[in-house]
Amino acid sequence: MGSYRIVENARLDARNTFGVRATAPMLVEVADATALPELFGYAMLRDGPVLVLGGGSNLLFAGDPRGTVLALGGQQVRIVEDDGGRAIVRADAGVEWHALVLWTLGQGLAGLENLALIPGTVGAAPIQNIGAYGVEVREHIHVVEAFDRTLGQVVRLRSTDCAFAYRDSVFKRDPDRYVVTAVEFALQRDAALRLEYAGLHDELLAMGMDAASLGDVRASQIAEAVCRIRRRKLPDPAVLGNAGSFFKNPIVPVAQAEGLQAAHPSLPAFHGSDETTRKLSAAWLIDACGWKGFREGDAGVAASHALVLVNHGQASGAQLLDLAHRIAASVHERFGVALEPEPRIIGAAW
Ligand SMILES: Cc1cc2nc3c(=O)[nH]c(=O)nc-3n(C[C@H](O)[C@H](O)[C@H](O)COP(=O)(O)OP(=O)(O)OC[C@H]3O[C@@H](n4cnc5c(N)ncnc54)[C@H](O)[C@@H]3O)c2cc1C
């Protein structure tokens, strides 16, 4: 049986990267996921609302969470299969994401380098199928292990069972069903590295590589380039509260994208999930509405990045949510495009 600790009226201010005030009526810190079947035997967890909280870097407490907040502490990382070329790495949900990326690179395993320095935990990585610099984590997920509250047991979902899509998965669509306990990643010792994302190439050159040696670039050098770009572009939540990109890039029909691009030739549009859609740059749309660097009280938009909402100090989650609504309304009014938040909103509806 695994161990756990219960804290009543637990403050969550330091457990969310926006740094907003929130209190959980009951916080259960689970050291070992084998405790979950027993814990979900209690009526309060079995029948009541449960919020699984990782590093709090992709949610906004617009109010206090109801019911129980569950934090998983498992910290194990190990290789469970290895044929010399391909290895399966298993990491507990509580492991810090960036620490896992560095661990795999240290083992000579490539695949996660473009996802370096994303805040948060391993358990949250499949929830929105984290992505950055041309790679999504689904490309390397082998199995997601989770406690299934509907079945009352631990299940192993293969990547193809997770309905992964852009910043989306079965876990995000049905947040009350699964508690992710561990993730297994399929990684390669000799993988083709991904350099196509704009900026990565230039950063490697700025690090002293010459164009001729880019063909021999190592995964750890890509991770370093990604970290350098991210440190320059994104505000550090330890200094300025934020949850990374607040809005998803909207996916619209091709005809709408073409119409908007005809009127606004500088609007970036990328391929959508299929040939009938295009993904527009939410940052461009928000910037065009004049929000970059906006501040009202302590709620604002980062000066360096129009997609990032920031807490300059004492903003409440409700104030940040109100600002997000106003931004989305202005983009809709000007461009007819609906923006959707990327973080999960707790304690209020979007
Ligand atoms: C500066 C900054 C940069 C960022 N850059 C990126 C980026 O490049 N790409 C990107 O995709 N994201 C990015 N993010 C968002 C965030 O880091 C990721 O979404 C991350 O995976 C969230 O991890 P977390 O542990 O903090 O999750 P939390 O914020 O704690 O939780 C997020 C969601 O996942 C659920 N959840 C968490 N753990 C579990 C679990 N074990 N089982 C079931 N559900 C769970 C929660 O209930 C919630 O719905 C960024 C955030 C910040 C602050």
Image: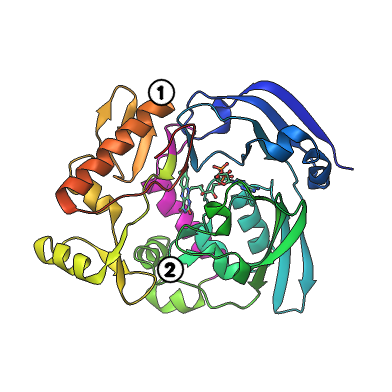
Q: Is residue 22 left or right of residue 189?
A: left
**In the rendered structure, which amino acid carries the disc numbered 1?**
Gly
Tag 2, which secondary structure?
loop
Relative to 98, say whether 38 is above or below.
above
Tag shown at residue 313: 1
Q: Is residue 75 left or right of residue 266?
A: right
Kindly identify the residue that appears in the image at 30 percent across and 21 percent down.
Answer: 297
From the top left corner, tell me how far across and down residue 103 is, in percent.
67, 57
Of residue 80 and residue 255, the one placed in the foreground of this image is 255
Picture coordinates of residue 19 (x, y %)?
49, 28
Dot 1 or dot 2, earlier in sequence: 2
In the figure, 283 relative to 313: above or below? Answer: below
Q: Is residue 233 magenta?
A: yes
Q: Which mark is residue 345?
A: none
From the image, which quarter does the C terminus lie in? top left
Residue neighbourhood size for the residue with mark 2, other residues' Cα within 10 Å, grouped as few (<14), some (14–19), many (≥20): some
Whole-number angstrom distance, CA of label 1 to CA of label 2: 40 Å
Q: Is 253 situated above or below 145?
A: below
- Where is residue 320? Give x, y as percent: 37, 31
Question: What is the secondary structure assignment of the residue under circle 1?
Answer: loop
Point 42% across, 64% down: residue: 204
What span is colored magenta in the figure? 218-242
The quadrant of the rendering that contains the N terminus is top right
Q: Residue 209 bears which disc, if any?
A: 2
Q: Give the amino acid type for the residue marked by disc 2 in the picture.
A: Met
**Magenta residues, dominant SS class:** helix
Q: Residue furthest right?
A: 1
Q: Inspect this view and state whether residue 1 appears.
A: yes
Examine the structure image and report whether residue 142 is included in the region drawn in magenta: no
Kindly tell me whether residue 301 is visible in this rendering: no
Residue drawn at x 33%, y 77% as measured from the top left: 275
Coloring applied to the structure: rainbow
